[in-house]
Amino acid sequence: MATDYQEKSRSGGLAWIYAPVILILFLGGALSVGAYFYGDPQLTIAESIVAGFGGLAGIIIGLIAALFGVILGLVGALIGVVAAGGAVAMTLFIIGSPLLAIVLIFLLLRKSKSDCPDPAAHQ
């Protein structure tokens, strides 16, 4: 008995490559049209295309630089948190050390509560 089972073929994986390219082309074209029609000195078609895609390249580079700045800022914040934690620990150590020393001195100076005045005699 032969089965007629066929898997559905999946497609559309290449759209993830084409979508950003098409988006960049349309956005650059829109900026070029805007530069051609609304430029203060009248631009030629070639100059408006250069201005449109150059502006888009500037936007993309600015976004990449902003992402780099955010990542660098997060690393700096992490270093700041570590440094602040170290400062808190150092402050607690500076305040706590004399208090601990005073407590230990009082523990060492108190008299022993043993009944026998010479415990070494029993050894």
Image (tube, rainbow, N blue to C red):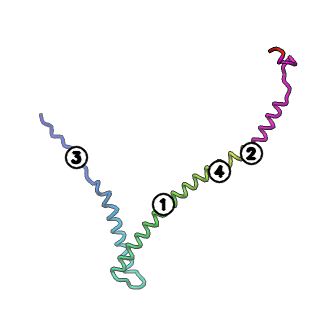
Residue holding disc 1: 67
Residue holding disc 4: 84
Measure the alpha-carbon separation of dots 2 and 4.
Answer: 15 Å
* Amino acid type at mark 3: Lys
Residue holding disc 3: 8
Q: For the magenta stretch, what is the residue range?
A: 94-120
Give yes or no for contact between labels 2 and 4 (Cβ–Cβ under 8 Å). no
- Disc nearer the start of the sequence (2/1): 1
Measured from the top left, where is residue 51 in percent x and y?
Answer: 39, 76
Residue at point 51%, 57% (across, down): 71
Residue 61, relative to residue 74: is it above or below? below
* Amino acid type at mark 2: Ile
Measure the alpha-carbon separation of dots 1 and 3.
Answer: 40 Å
Residue at point 21%, 44% (across, down): 7
Residue at point 41%, 85% (across, down): 41
Measure the alpha-carbon separation of dots 3 and 4.
Answer: 57 Å
Kindly identify which numbered label has been placed on residue 15.
none
Q: Residues within 10 Å of mark 2 (few under 14, many from 20)?
A: few
